[in-house]
Amino acid sequence: MNLENLTKQEAIQLMQEGKCITHKYFAPSEWMRMNKNGKILFEDGVECDVYEFFSWRKGESWESGYSIYPN
């Protein structure tokens, strides 16, 4: 697993393990993780379903480019 360029599936797995994840298109302060209910929780407190998040982020550019957010 390349922690500097994670795939979407690797990022989802790490979020399920409690890690904060960012993406190359996110602003430097933006991150996401999964809460206990399996929803994505963002740094600003917004929550959404995994399906909802990725339904708006389709295409090859969203299949990779994730990394662990430096806390």
Image: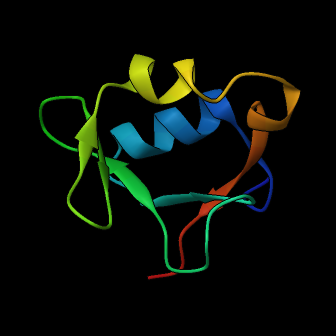
Residue 5 lies, in percent from the top left, at 80, 53
Location of residue 16 with respect to 5 vertically, above or below: above
Left or right, 67 with reference to 68: right
Q: Nearer the viewer, residue 20 or 54?
A: 54
Q: Is residue 1 visible?
A: no
Residue 60 lies, in percent from the top left, at 86, 27
Residue furthest right in the image: 60
Q: Residue at x 50, y 79 (%)?
A: 29
Please tell me in which quadrant of the rendered image residue 36 appears: top left
Left or right, 70 with reference to 19: right
Residue 7 lies, in percent from the top left, at 73, 36
Residue furthest front in the image: 56
Q: Nearer the viewer, residue 20 or 41?
A: 41
Total labels drawn: 0
Colour basis: rainbow
Left or right, 23 with reference to 32: right
Residue 69 lies, in percent from the top left, at 53, 70
Quarter holding the C terminus is bottom left
Left or right, 17 with reference to 56: left
Q: Is residue 62 visible?
A: yes
Quarter holding the N terminus is top right
Q: Residue at x 24, y 51 (%)?
A: 46
Please tell me in which quadrant of the rendered image residue 8 appears: top right
Location of residue 3 with respect to 54 vertically, above or below: below
